[in-house]
Amino acid sequence: MDIEGSVALVTGGASGLGEAALRSLVAAGMHALIADMNAEKGEAVAASIGDAVGFARCDVTDADAVQAAVDAAAAMGPLRVVIHCAGTGWAGRTINRDNTPHDPNAFELVVRVNTIGTFNVLTRAAAKMAAETEPTAAGERGVIVNTASVAAFDGQIGQLAYAASKASVVGMTLPAARDLAPVGIRVCTIAPGLMDTPLLGLLPDDQKSELAANVVFPKRLGSPEEFAQLAESIVRNSYMNGETIRLDGAIRMPPKG
């Protein structure tokens, strides 16, 4: 798909995977809107890139806020790309060491952000594309790339909520692609492994080295730029649809991190 001159909506675009994807797409000739909770970082990233990038403060669990961000992106030009990176995590076992159950409020929060947030962005963006984005000569209106995690398949001890929420993102991928085929919108998901994001950057070097040792090859953490490369490749390759792609150096997570 030719993306030059069109618009991308990037949730979680103020840092990490989202920021890398945003910069990659803008370098390829797109305009973009950052949708993120962190206004200070989001506005700073937008200002560092220039007029091609805007910012909207957005809580993806709020359907109205998502709609406002989608509308703002579409006002910049033809909305053809969504890279959805906004998400959260939580560590908590099914039952605690004192045999009390997992905190239901924590479980609900993670599912609300990761699953309902993905649903909100997916459905609102698809509706806008279907209604307002003119199809290409090949009948393609756009592509939505969601972000899951290898935890969807290899959930570790303490990842009950996170694994469930990311498995839901994987589970939405194929039916969404089938639903949106008549209007020319593709849907794919990236499931990253251990990525060197700001969150992991808070760990000491020795702990990061221990994590990297579990990767088959190359024995290191993945970079946000590698996520961005894959996201852009999915966007450009019109035959990529309905698939979840692991980006993980062949790691299969052990029970304990």
Image (tube, grey):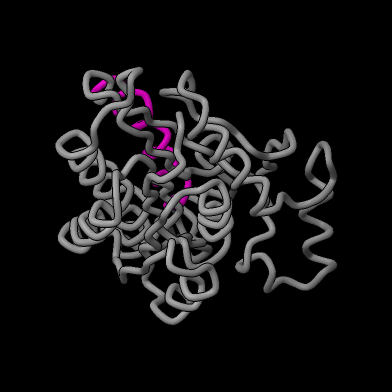
* Vertical relation: 130 (above or below) 204: above
At horizontal 46% and vertical 51% (from top left) the residue drawn is 162
Q: Quadrant of residue 20?
A: bottom right
The stretch in magenta equals: 160-179
At horizontal 51% and vertical 53% (from top left) the residue drawn is 26
Front in this rendered view, residue 72 or 214: 72
Residue 86 location, x and y as percent? 42, 57
Left or right of 256 on screen, residue 55: left
Front in this rendered view, residue 160 or 6: 6
Quadrant into which the N terminus falls: top left
* Vertical relation: 137 (above or below) 38: above
* Residue 164 belongs to the span the image colors magenta: yes
At horizontal 19% and vertical 61% (from top left) the residue drawn is 68
* Outermost residue to the bottom: 40
Left or right of 43 on screen, residue 108: left
Residue 234 location, x and y as percent? 52, 32
Q: Can see residue 167?
A: yes
At horizontal 32% and vertical 25% (from top left) the residue drawn is 136
Q: Quadrant of residue 169?
A: top left
Residue 77 location, x and y as percent? 29, 50
Residue 250 location, x and y as percent? 73, 33
Q: Can see residue 101?
A: no
Left or right of 255 on screen, residue 133: left
* Residue 84 belongs to the span the image colors magenta: no
